[in-house]
Image (spheres, grey):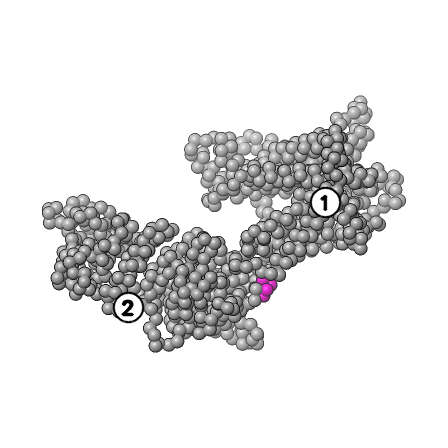
Amino acid sequence: MSNKGQSTVDTDAERRTESPVGSETAETAADGSDATVGGGSRPGSDAPVLELDGLRKSYATETVVEGLSLSVREGEILTLLGPSGCGKTTTLRLIAGLERPDGGSVRLNGESMSGSSFVAPEDRGVGVVFQEFALFPHLTARENVAFGLKNRPDDEVSDRVDELLELVDLAGQGDSYPDQLSGGQQQRVALARSLAPEPDILLLDEPFSNLDVDLRVEMREEVRDIIKRAGVTAVSVTHDQEEALSISDRVAVMTDGRIEQIGEPETVFQHPESRFVAAFLGYASFVPGYVSGDIVETDLGTVPREQIHGLAREYDHTRIDLLVRPDDVSAQPVADAAEGCGRVVGRRYLGPTFLYEIELDTGESIQCMHNHDENVPTSGPVDLDLDADHELAWFPREQRPEDDARYGT
Amino acid sequence: MAGEHQPIDDDAGHEDRLPLGPSIAAAAVSAAVLLPVLWLIKTGFGVGFESAVALLTRPRTLEVFVNSALLVALTTAACVAIGVPLAYLTVRTDLPFRRFWTIAVSLPLVIPSYVGAFAFVSAFGPQGGFQRLLAPLGIERLPEIYGLEGTVLILTLYTYPYVYITARASLKSMDTTLIDAARTLEHDRWETFRRVTVPQIRPAVAAGALLSALYVLADFGTPSIMRYDVFTRVIFVEFGTFGRDTAVLLSLQLIAVTVFILWLESRIRGEERTTAGGRSRALVPLGRWRYPAVLPVAAVAGLALVVPVAILVSWLLATGTTANQSLVFEWSYAINSVTVSAAAAAVAVVAGIPVAYLSARHGGRLPDAFERISYVGYAVPGVVLGLALVFFGSAYAAPIYQTLYLLVFAYVIRFLPQSVGSLRASFLSVDPALPEAARTLGQTPVGAFRRVTLPLVAPGLFGGAALVFLTTMKELPATLLLRPSGFTTLVTHIWTAYESGYFGQAAIPALVLLFVSGLSMLVILRQEGYDVK
């Protein structure tokens, strides 16, 4: 199980125990907030290219996809984001027709792909970029790209292949075999191959997981650019939150075969509707607070009520948890323990920054981020400041699970 | 990353339902393969309980059983005792000319054991060439070559390469940092070998020993020439003297012993636990034993390779005066051999494709059953298969009895496991995402198979075909029993020459056989990238 770049809940067991809580929270928070937060498809906009409705799939005893519904608009890039085993790859394979759903429906351009008659993958008009690219090793780059161009005159095929190799910036590599190409080049060939037959929708299965870290960031930009230039609707799948937030028009966070939250990247990141989403997207700490009139009292000081996103009146005089990201908090060493509110219990060097783990006197654990040149002594008391200049998300206190350790440590 | 999605990716390759076409084809192949064995069992029941018990408890039957068991046990032990040290010497130590020795000690595999037996008997038997050479020195008698000792010697010389090759492959792929780790944990070389290397190579050695044991149990030519009564020899004799019931019951008993050995191997092999890991290229220095260590290696290669070839060549040069005109070699024998072998190879591959494909791509109860059934040929020695098909063919399939169709059918049943094994490995090595990618690019399942899967498994397909071709060329008992009258192959010609005592007449066909076998071995080595560095 990877834990790179995110300190989140990650094991199956943990997710299971948490998800019911997460979903309740989602509802509660949604009730309390103003309408839906950019989630779901907006009715009235362009007709959706892809619609999933109550999709279900299980293998033997394990349910992998459980009543999943979503729709994707023309020209949009939507990313299914979730930890491994959440069913996102299976969802993609159900869309492609590589698996048959046990229930629910897949509609492409309004036509039903499953149900009474199952439409085979070759008849769906989908393009797929596979995780390991799945380039045919016995064919050259050109032949790979030309593979899906059937029943066309040779010169038309040749023109189309040239056009695509041009699009992915590989005009000179057409005659190379896949094993003669670098990882990035292979990915571009895979992309060109899947775009060649002009699919109605492009599906990308963990498209960057096979690349080196440096190349990954570079290819993200490039792939997004190519998809936008080709004007194709795309659904991508990843477990990497940074990737999802950077390439997508909308993100759907998945867990346990369901969609937990769907919306634009900024919205999902800033206003997570559940603790799971909050913890899965980046570092998250939960600061306990008490709603008292126009302020919320916390261990880190008071926060004005208007800075809390959609905090409804009925939560007056209740305990809540505020979601704070490490860059919202800073720590200062203090001479006297009475002036401080906790102490440093851990420090992680992330390169440009240090991530400090602070244990509050009340026992809570908070993460804060400091520039690599600001050194906070790891012994002695510290005081914490909350200096966020944006709205903060919150969760009702009683929703909080017993075990704090699973969040953001 | 790849590991993370294991539970889902595992299922990813299989669609929920089995494809109809390949399933029907695989079912048909399974039925054809099972036919002779089922017939044999049915006939066995027909003998009647009391007479069956009487036949099976005769002292003669018990003697045959004990003889066979002794032969298999001793030969297999000797194969391991020779094969594993040879593998260790040629892989892990600084033995001089390791490349050369690797090839030299693998090559006995291309010599059919009965040709070796034939050559050894003529050289070292009573009144053989070797004895005549020594006669002036007053040596009247050589140690007896006939019987158990001689049979064990010959069969060991020609079956140890199975153990050698599997042990070598396993030693080569073994993570040598494990050995380094053991050494840093205060184990000397011997302790390390015993506690780290042996458990690592055990599954491979067991697999090689299984091949040796099955070969020995099924071999008909060698024990016959060495006049040692084992199942195959006695079954053949009973069949010749119309002792049908005895032949059938002994055949069933032989199959039972074979199945027992298969079971034993699966117990010994244990679970394969291998880890990929680093390699250190460091070899074990032999020190002052470096050159002396060549001696045993050279002795094995010399005895197994040089002696029989030298004897065959000496026959070739000496023929002329004693030639029997009816036994003159004709090139049509070679053409016959090549034709039936090529036909068997082609059919075995075509029949193997659906079985291997289903098992590799879909798994599940039915495909697994098809695959297991295709391995029946492993457990049915050629003489038993020949016998079953003679009776079956003459009773139910008269139109193809005494034709090449039945002969090729027998070869296919016998050697189908080789083509299925090779094809299955090839199908497994094709990333399931590739045909899926072809599907999303507009190919039907058949189109995806033809344009993507088939080109990628082609090397394995040819490798499997070459393997079947090689073994069919050498096959003796089923050929003797099922060939149409007047149809002579290299093998049957050699056998006729042996039976009529004109050893010299066997030289040309035997050498041609070695040449062709050698060629197909080369093909196999190329296919499997048997790098001898």
In the image, is residue A46 part of the stretch drawn in magenta?
Answer: no
Query: Secondary structure of the magenta portion, mostly?
Result: helix
Q: Mark yes or no: residue B220 visible.
A: no
Where on the picture, by quarter, is residue B260?
A: top right
Would you say B256 lies left or right of B312 here?
left
Percent x, y of residue A341: 15, 50
Where on the picture, by quarter, is residue A399?
A: bottom left
- Amino acid type at circle 1 is Lys
Relative depth, front residue between B369 and B499: B369
- Residue corresponding to mark 1: B42
Would you say A318 lies left or right of B57 here?
left
- Amino acid type at circle 2 is Thr
Q: In this view, does A350 lie above or below B167?
A: below
Q: How crowded is the residue under tag 1: few (<14 C-alpha within 10 Å), some, or many (20+)?
A: few
The answer as to whether the residues below labels 1 and 2 share one chain is: no
Residue at figure coordinates x 80%, y 42% from the top left? B495
Q: In this view, does B88 lie above or below A142?
A: above
Would you say B42 lies left or right of A8 here?
right
Report the span colored magenta: B446-451
Would you say A278 lies left or right of A387 here?
right
**Label 1, label 2: how many angstroms apart (C-alpha)?**
75 Å
Q: Is residue B328 above or below residue A389?
A: above
Relative depth, front residue between A393 and B130: A393
Disc ID at residue A36: 2
Percent x, y of residue A406: 29, 50
Relative depth, front residue between B189 and A187: A187
Q: What element carries label 2?
A: loop
Residue at figure coordinates x 58%, y 66% from the top left? B447
**Chain to which mark 1 belongs:** B
Residue at figure coordinates x 69%, y 43% from the top left? B380
Which of discs 1 and 2 lies nearer the camera? The answer is 1
